[in-house]
Amino acid sequence: MGEVAEATGYADLWASLHAIGRDAGTGGYRRFAWNAADLACREWFAAQAADRGLTVETDRNGNQWARWEPEPALVPGPEAKASGAGALAIGSHLDSVPDGGAFDGPLGVISSFAAVDLLRSRGWRPNRPVVIANFTDEEGARFGVACTGSRLMSGLLDADKARGLCDADGVRLADAMERVGLDPRAIGRDEDRLGDIAAFVELHIEQGRALDDVGAPVGVASAIWPHGRWRFDFDGEANHAGTTALEERRDPMLTYAHTVLSARKKARLGGALATFGRVRVDPNGTNAIPSRVRAWLDARAPDEAVLAAVVKDIREAAVQRARRDGTTLDVENESLTPVVEFDGVLRGRLSKALEPEFGTVPVLPTGAGHDAGILAAEVPTAMVFVRNPTGRSHTPHEHAETTDCHAGVRALAHIVADLAGGESGS
Ligand SMILES: [Zn+2]
């Protein structure tokens, strides 16, 4: 057994979370904001913190924080006082996409608890608070907006708009929060919480194969691609599938299908990514031409100009096709997240802290959104990626090798030791 396995009970830590919200049929996770599985994950988080003697708080926006305070003898050190040292935040999220994998989110939370265990086993103590975050509703699987917890905390998501968000059953976010004993009137920008955080480092499974390609167990993020979601409403005319001649039809499915193909082509030509992964058909009958096809475009690109150009191209191709099909198109932008460049100084410091064990670590951009991307606008923020050998993510097949997960824990421990500037007892 390695140091991580021995010092942290790492396998047990995973085992204790494994069954929560896991669908027996698919093997995927269904941990959506404020559902029973999500609440069980939150209880798990509180229990893990309590086991370690960390205090747990739930903030106004529903994010959980487990806090490791420096011992009184070590604060206030003159140095900490002079720099007005706030907390070092680590952590990630515990919610999932529909049938998500085990690692996206939980790897960062579990690694954070394990890094605390590892540092303690080495006799290390922080000289500033170290807080572990469980951000609420990172995936947006239930209410449609990703990173709700961090967006609310930073004021990026309007509180009124958030309260009114509805899930597929028509349950409002405000009511879902109220049902679990939280006050939805209190959500919104949290100046105190933001002011308390000196830096945030999120460890996450890589959602691609870049680390595997270069044979590295961990890497550091450079930037998050700008990305957004657009709702496409294709409207036509419902009619009988058996009696309506082809030339008589106004079939929005046809326009939609053509748009999917052109999105692929425009993305390829533009060096971007475009995906239609969600679609709703009315009336959704096998023997009926649809009256409406509502579909969501997820698009991402290396920079904002490319993203805007590719989405414009997709939209124009759809409008042209709609003219041919006798259908109409309405496009609504539901969210748009600008490019995020992670703090260069912090990134450099991470690389330096990792160098003694890992050598020169790869620095890579990602197309996936994260709470770290939201917080980057407020505090110095960085990300550590752990190798994903298949690159698959948002599927039950998502996987990371245990040895790489252990490397991630050690990496995080190096970073905490550096940034929270503690003293070693050994
Ligand atoms: Zn994630």
Image (cartoon, helix red, strand yellow):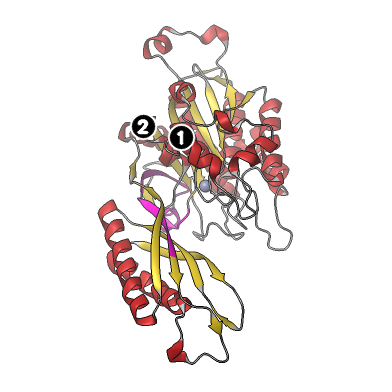
Q: Is residue 219 left or right of residue 243?
A: left
Q: Locate residue 26, reporting x and y percent.
A: 68, 63
Q: Is residue 307 magenta?
A: no
Disc 2 marks a residue whose amino acid type is Leu
Question: Which disc number belongs to residue 346?
Answer: 2
Q: Residues within 10 Å of mark 1 (few under 14, many from 20)?
A: many
Contact, mark 1 vs mark 2 (Cβ under 8 Å): yes
Q: Nearer the viewer, residue 126 or 85?
A: 85
Quadrant housing residue 325:
bottom left
Please give the name of the residue rendered at 72% of the width and 42% of the height, measured from the top-left corner.
Answer: 16
Residue stretch in magenta: 207-232
Work out whether 180 lies above or below 197: below
Q: Nearer the viewer, residue 425 or 67?
A: 67
Q: Is residue 124 left or right of residue 54?
A: left
Decide if residue 380 is in sight here. Answer: yes
Q: Locate residue 201, reporting x and y percent.
A: 46, 34
Question: Which disc number belongs to residue 201?
Answer: 1
| Quadrant holding the N terminus | top right
Q: What SS does tag 2 mark?
A: helix
Q: What SS does tag 1 mark?
A: strand
Q: Is residue 287 left or right of residue 161?
A: right
Q: Is residue 212 magenta?
A: yes
Disc 1 marks a residue whose amino acid type is Val
Decide if residue 271 is in sight here. Answer: no
Question: Rounded to the nearest whole Å, what is the CA distance between mark 1 and mark 2?
Answer: 9 Å
Mark before the other along the chain sequence, 1 or 2 = 1
Please give the name of the residue rendered at 30% of the width and 69% of the height, measured from the top-left corner.
Answer: 316
